[in-house]
Image (spheres, coloured by chain):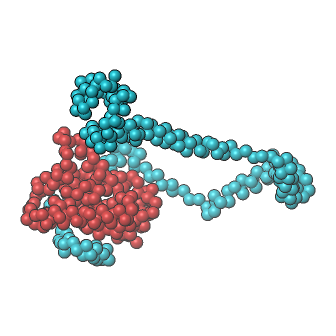
Chain colours: A cyan, B red
């Protein structure tokens, strides 16, 4: 009854409609099946027994054992062995070795003394203990050194190949010709212009002869005067 | 105490171990447990004839091994365990023997259900059986043991070799699936 209530309570806690549902089995069972089933099943077991004779034999041990038999058994064997003529009465069942007197009492102190003596000897010889697993500082810094080198090369390459060249020639090259002309006309006079031309700097300006003559004519300068 | 009236498990076991009363004890045991075990198996395999065959195998196994039963659990827990294992073994054998590939075992048992004498899809008892047949085998066993046999989780754990927590979760899921199936109509 308790189990029944537990199950119903459990289903109600879950809010399950199964708690109130009928649990009748709807399956059809042949008439008087359970009345005859027992006989049928027992008969079936006998038939299985006949097919396998060993099946009928029980593995259960029918023998009884006196109380405490197994716990007392080793002692009984020992006593029986000792009572026979094969074993001398004065048989020493212990080991044959002898141990110096007070050996085990003095053993801890002896070991401690030896350890202390060994430690003193090590200290006096300045034995340097080299750790097999210790690595030098350089070993640990190798990765940092490699990173620094890589960064240096990268920066240098960047400066050389990619960074714009901020020199005067580069800046002047980017100035348009019209601006240069205007500047020259504002800040130079004809004499400077002559000086420029006489120095042959026109060649550096990459002007052809026709352009020079045209310029001179505009300025009213006779080309023959220059020679 | 006459054996014919002996119903406690301990008496039955002692009587079974005695050669002179073995058969009488066994008959008494079968009479006591056959109906419970019958319904446990039938709820799994649906067909009466299949249930009868499985139950015969169960009792043969009981006869073989009852003498060695160590009483670490209840006798009926031990019997349920044999019945469950025999049922699952039989189902596996049927799957292998079937000449038609059954991709959905649950649907094959659902089909067997509709062929049952007196089947009525409008009755809630049949709807419940249909819903249960949609559950996976192990979950079906858990649901049946709890819902129909009203078995405590601790005893189910002994039968199925599963933890109590897993069984509670499995039963809860099974109950939800069954409800959903019934509501779906």
Q: Nearer the viewer, residue B44 or B132?
A: B132
**Does residue A197 lie above or below A167 as drawn?**
above
The quadrant holding residue A17 is bottom left
The quadrant holding residue B3 is bottom left
The quadrant holding residue B156 is bottom left
Q: Residue B35: where, in percent of width, then height?
A: 26, 63
Q: Which of A141 and B163 is in front in this view?
A: A141
Q: Residue B157: where, in percent of width, then height?
A: 38, 62
**Does residue A93 lie above or below B159 as drawn?**
above
- In the rendered image, which quarter contains the N terminus of chain B? bottom left
Residue displayed at 28% across by 74% down: A10
Residue displayed at 20% across by 64% down: B178
Left or right of A72: which side holds B52?
A: left
Residue A105 visible, this angle: yes
Q: Which of A164 and A16 is in front in this view?
A: A164
Query: Number of labelled discs?
Result: 0
Residue A88 visible, this angle: no
Residue displayed at 19% across by 75% down: A20
């Amino acid at each position: 009854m308790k189990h029944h209530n537990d199950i119903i309570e459990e289903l109600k806690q879950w809010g399950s409609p199964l708690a109130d549902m009928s649990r009748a089995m709807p399956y059809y069972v042949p008439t008087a099946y359970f009345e005859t089933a027992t006989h049928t099943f027992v008969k079936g077991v006998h038939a299985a027994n006949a097919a396998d004779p060993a099946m009928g034999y029980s593995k259960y041990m029918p023998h009884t054992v006196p109380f405490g038999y197994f716990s007392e058994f080793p002692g009984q064997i020992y006593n029986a062995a000792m009572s026979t003529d094969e074993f001398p009465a004065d048989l020493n069942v212990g080991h044959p070795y002898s141990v110096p007197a007070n050996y085990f009492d003095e053993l801890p102190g002896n070991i401690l003394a030896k350890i202390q003596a060994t430690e003193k000897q090590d200290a006096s010889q300045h034995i340097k203990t080299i750790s097999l697993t210790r690595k030098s500082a350089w070993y640990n810094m190798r990765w940092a050194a490699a990173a620094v080198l890589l960064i240096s090369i990268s920066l240098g390459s960047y400066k050389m190949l990619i960074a714009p060249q901020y020199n005067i020639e580069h800046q002047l090259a980017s100035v348009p010709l019209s601006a240069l002309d205007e500047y020259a006309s504002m800040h130079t006079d004809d004499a400077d212009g002559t000086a420029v031309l006489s120095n042959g700097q026109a060649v550096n300006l990459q002007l052809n002869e026709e352009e020079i003559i045209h310029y001179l004519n505009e300025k009213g300068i006779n080309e023959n005067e220059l020679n | 105490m006459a054996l014919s009236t002996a119903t406690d498990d301990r008496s039955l076991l002692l009587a079974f171990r005695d050669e002179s009363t073995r058969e009488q004890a066994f008959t008494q045991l079968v009479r006591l447990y056959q109906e419970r075990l019958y319904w446990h198996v039938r709820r799994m395999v649906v067909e009466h004839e299949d249930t009868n065959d499985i139950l015969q195998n169960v009792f043969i196994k009981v006869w073989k091994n009852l003498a060695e039963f160590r009483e670490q659990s209840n006798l009926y827990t031990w019997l349920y365990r044999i019945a469950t294992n025999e049922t699952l073994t039989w189902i596996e054998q049927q799957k292998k023997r079937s000449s038609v590939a059954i991709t959905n075992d649950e649907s094959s048992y659902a089909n067997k259900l509709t062929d049952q004498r007196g089947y009525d899809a409008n009755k809630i008892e049949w709807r419940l059986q249909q819903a249960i047949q949609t559950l996976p085998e192990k979950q079906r066993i858990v649901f049946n043991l709890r819902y129909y046999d009203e078995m405590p989780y601790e005893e189910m754990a002994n039968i199925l070799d599963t933890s109590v927590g897993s069984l509670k979760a499995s039963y809860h899921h099974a109950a939800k699936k069954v409800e959903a199936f019934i509501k779906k109509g």
